[in-house]
Image (cartoon, rainbow, N blue to C red):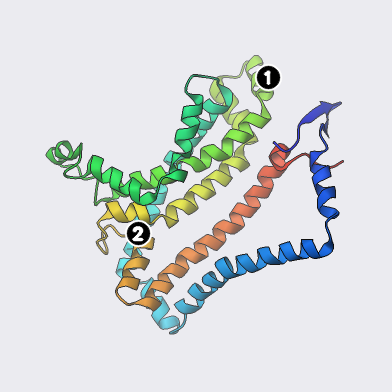
Amino acid sequence: MMADITANAGRVVPASGNTRVAHRAAADEPIWVRRSLIGLVFVFLGVFLVVPLAIVLSSALSQGWALYARAVTDPDTWSAIVLTLWVVAITVPLNTLFGIAAAWAIARFDFRGRSVLTSLIDLPFSVSPVVVGLAYVLVFGRGGWLGPWLGAHDIQIIFAMPGMVLVTMFVTVPFVARELIPVLAERGQEEEEGALSLGASGWQTFFRVTLPAVKWGLLYGVVLTTARALGEYGAVAVVSGRVPGENETLTLRVDMLYENYQATAAFAVASLLAVIALITLVLKTYLGDRKDNACPLSAGAPDS
């Protein structure tokens, strides 16, 4: 939290001048220092983000719209799009429910193992997706711990959509919870306790008080989860089997086309992911602003 606040006669007043001091210190820097730092940031972003994205889009259309349309409308590409959407449609709601429950437990209750739960939620940030895929193969694969039992009951996890959903859920676990935990912690429980004291049930309090108060943070986490699920490659590549038209997502489709020397088609399919990334960026910026406005503490205390 960048600044503590106190309530005085219904008005939010910053109790610390840390933010204002930081702004004043930045303003006292020589103008050439500020311009150099800003210019360096823009150059870095241009070289490593904007230029590669522009190359993808230009390469996708390098041989005309006809080839682009043929690559995008290819049956295997459409199969990859449909499978990707199915994985996202299953993963995002499940991780949203988990994120809400985990954030509620961590922000509202003090219990033994709370720090362990927080660390486990952050685990996907530090584990390579390839390692995640291999771990699931060792558990659910034909020669894995549960492989014989799954085979005996004709249940296929690895090299099928269930395995792809499971690994995608693993890598996208933290986003909703990590967005909601600070929002819930900063808002406190006064409004919820007031609703309960007036006779509202727990579910009524959650849907009518808590959820509207954190909706922008929740939507922000959902957008991040969706973007991560759409772009997952490493873990899905290990558990999918990569059979075109059957268990190939968009990211795997791009890789397959490029490995088969169909670079233009690969860039055409990759451009779909690039467009989704741009849409996600716009949504992320919009929802981030709404989230900060709804909970000023997450963005620092306002100047008065």
> Residue 175: image x %, image y %?
51, 43
> Which is more N-terminal, label 1 or label 2?
1
Image quarter of residue 216: top right
| Residue 298 located left or right of residue 281 | right
Q: Secondary structure at mark 2?
A: loop
Answer yes or no: is residue 74 visible. Answer: no
Q: Are marks 2 and 1 in contact (CB under 8 Å)?
A: no
> Residue 53: image x %, image y %?
53, 70
Label 2, label 1: how far apart the Cα atoms are:
48 Å
Question: Which residue is drawn at the image coordinates 52% and 40% (left, top)?
Answer: 176
> Residue 30: image x %, image y %?
84, 60
Mark drawn on residue 194: 1
Mark drawn on residue 233: none
Mark drawn on residue 249: 2
Q: Nearer the viewer, residue 12 or 39?
A: 39
Check disc 2: other Cα within 10 Å, few if <14, some if 14-19, many if 20+. many
Question: Which residue is drawn at the image coordinates 37% and 67% (left, top)?
Answer: 254
